[in-house]
Image: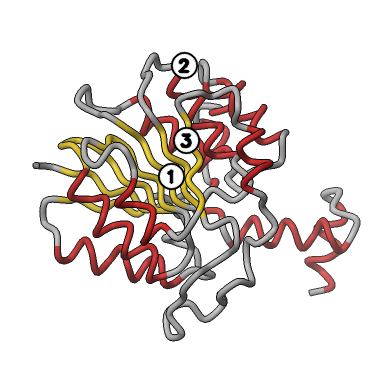
Amino acid sequence: MAAITRWLRALGFRSREERERLDLATRYEHYWYNAQKKIDLTKVDGFGRLARRVRDQRRTYLHVDRLYTLWQGVASLPPSSKAVVEIGVYRGGSVRFLGEALRLHGREIPMYACDTFDGHTVVDAAADTRHAVGKQFTGASVEKVRGYLADLPLVEVVPGDIQLTAPTLDVQDGYGLVHIDVDVYPITRFCLEHFAPKLVAGGTIVVDDYGFKTCPGAKQAVDEFAAAHPEFRRWHLLTGQALLVRLSP
C-alpha cells in the first residue's frame, strides 16, 4: 500500500481525497471508459445550452446524461403525439427542460407536470426500504414551481396524488413521452399501468432511478410491467434510467 501511495504521489495525486477519487473512478471505469472519444453532449446543438442553463438553476437532480435521454425522447416524439407528462416534478427543473425542448423542436403540445408537492403518499415496506411517507421531497412549493414555469404556457402543473389526478387530465390518450421519477414501487407501478395504454405506438416511457441501488422499488415495478406487456421493449440505460418503447398499439 505504501508503494502505491508513493506512486500516486509521484503522479501528482497528493491528497487522500484525490487518491480516493482516483480509486472511485477506477472501480467504475465501465461508465466512463473511452470518454475522450465520445461526443461531448454539452456541445450538441440546442441541447448543451439548455442543459447547462437548467443545471445552473439548481432545480433538478438530473445531470447532463439523464437530461440527454429526455432530449432524445422529445426529438423522437411520434407525429401522432398529443401530450407529454412528467410525474415527480419536485422543484420543476426537468419540467422546464422538457417544456423548452418541446419548444425548440417545434412541438407545441400540452405537458402535464404532476406531483404531490408533499413527498410520498404511499411506499412499499419491502421494496422501498429507504423511503417513507411524507419524509423525502417535501421541500417543494407548488406556487413557486408554477411561478418558475409561468413562461411556458403549454405546461400545466397538477398538484396532488397522481392516483387521483391522472384520470382528470384533459388529454386521456395519445401521450408521446411519459417521464416517471417517483422512486418508489406503488406509484411507479400505478403510473406504468395508467399511462402505458395511453401511449402512442413508438412513444416512450422513461423511468428514472431504475438502475439505482437506492430505489429498488422502481426497478421492481418496471421489471414486473415489462414481463407482463410484450408490446413494450425495456432498455436499461447506463444513465440508470429505464426506457420502455411501445412497439404496437
Q: Quadrant of the C terminus?
A: top left
Q: Nearer the viewer, residue 171 or 54?
A: 171
Give coordinates of residue 20: x percent, y percent: 76, 63
Tell me the SS state at disc 1.
strand
Sequence-earlier tag: 2 or 3 = 2
| Residue 86 marker | 1
Mark 2 against mark 3, which lies toward the viewer? 3
Q: CA distance from mark 3 to mark 1?
A: 10 Å
Three-letter residue code for mark 2: Leu
Three-letter residue code for mark 1: Glu
Q: Which residue is mark 3?
A: 156
Q: Quadrant of the N terminus?
A: bottom right
| Farthest bottom residue in view | 126
Give coordinates of residue 74: x percent, y percent: 38, 29
Q: CA distance from mark 2 to mark 1?
A: 18 Å
Three-letter residue code for mark 3: Glu
Residue at position x 63%, y 61% from top? Answer: 137
Residue at position x 17%, y 66% from top? Answer: 227
Q: Nearer the viewer, residue 80 or 43?
A: 80
* CB within 8 Å, label 2 to label 3: no
Give coordinates of residue 159: x percent, y percent: 51, 51
Tell me the SS state at disc 3.
strand
Residue at position x 41%, y 33% from top? Answer: 111
Mark 2 surroundings within 10 Å by alpha-carbon count, few (fewer than 14), some (14 through 19), many (20 or more): some
Q: Which residue is mark 2?
A: 104
Mark 3 against mark 1, which lies toward the viewer? 3
Q: Is residue 184 above or below residue 242?
A: below
Sequence-earlier tag: 2 or 1 = 1
Tell me the SS state at disc 2.
helix
Mark 1 surroundings within 10 Å by alpha-carbon count, few (fewer than 14), some (14 through 19), many (20 or more): many
